[in-house]
């Protein structure tokens, strides 16, 4: 067989190959987990021993742990990362915030907000710490399993969305 004939056979063989299967669609978030007033589709994220949901437009970041979806998700100017065990704040450099003494905005230099809620049938400790315009948010559970989610947001609106993501955590029923 000449080169032209061989090329034609290979081309036809490639055309006859079955198309690759499309990537599976993300699992939708259970309707009872999506916070009221948050329109749009949300997707289910499988973590180690729990699930949570993120807006469908968010994208995974990083390599997923075995048997789980990605450990970090980002979208809308926010990042959210989940983990197991006790929460340890990531090491950060020095943050300098310039504030004028006559700044009329309440809490212009920063504020820390801590509170507890029942989420997924378990008590969770939540936080929303603001430094300048940046927000550092998180939620931690010690039972039924020690897990946490944390994130950074560019403004208060996105920080509120992160807190709603944390409110979607569900633990498997035993």
Image: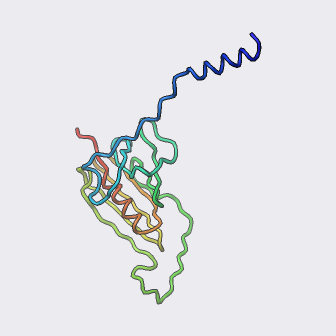
Is the residue 26 above or below the residue 103 in the image?
above
- Outermost residue toward the bottom in this view: 102
141 vs 106: above or below: above
Looking at the image, how many numbered discs can be counted on the residues?
0
Residue 124 location, quadrant:
bottom left
**At which x and y percent is residue 33?**
27, 50
| Residue in the foreground of this view, choosing between 90 and 61 | 61
Question: Relative to residue 147, is residue 4 drawn left or right?
Answer: right
Q: Is residue 168 above or below residue 68?
A: below
Q: Name the image quarter holding the C terminus.
A: top left
Which residue does the image show at 37% across and 46% down from the upper left? 43
Q: Residue at x 46, y 44 (%)?
A: 70
Q: Residue furthest top?
A: 1
Give how far across and how far down residue 167 sits, in percent.
30, 55
Place of residue 17 in the rendered image (x, y in percent of width and height, measured from the top left): 55, 21
Point out the image quarter for the N terminus. Answer: top right
Q: Please give the name of the residue rendered at 36% of the width and 49% of the height, measured from the top-left corner.
A: 42
Residue in front for this viewpoint, 52 or 97: 52
Using the image as rendered, state which of residue 24 and residue 18 is in the foreground: 18
Residue 61 x, y percent position in the rendering: 50, 48
Q: Nearer the viewer, residue 141 or 38?
A: 38
Q: Quadrant of residue 46?
A: top left
At 41% from the left and 54% from the top, the residue drawn is 87
Q: Picture quarter containing residue 126?
A: bottom left
Q: How is the image coloured?
A: rainbow
């Amino acid at each position: 067989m000449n080169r032209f004939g061989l090329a034609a056979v290979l081309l036809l063989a490639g055309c006859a190959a079955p198309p690759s299967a499309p990537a599976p669609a993300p699992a939708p978030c259970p309707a009872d987990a999506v916070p009221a007033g948050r329109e749009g589709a949300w997707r289910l994220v499988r973590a180690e021993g729990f699930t949570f949901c993120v807006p469908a437009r968010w994208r995974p970041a990083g390599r997923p742990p075995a048997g789980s979806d990605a450990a970090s998700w980002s979208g809308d100017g926010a990042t959210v990362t989940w983990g197991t065990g006790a929460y340890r704040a990531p090491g950060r450099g020095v943050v300098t915030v310039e504030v004028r003494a006559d700044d009329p905005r309440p809490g212009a230099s920063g504020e820390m907000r801590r509170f507890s809620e029942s989420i997924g049938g378990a008590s969770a400790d939540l936080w929303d710490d603001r430094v300048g315009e940046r927000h550092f948010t998180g939620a931690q559970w010690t039972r039924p399993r020690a897990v946490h989610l944390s994130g950074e947001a560019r403004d208060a609106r996105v920080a509120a969305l992160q807190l709603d993501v944390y409110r979607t955590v569900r633990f498997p029923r035993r």
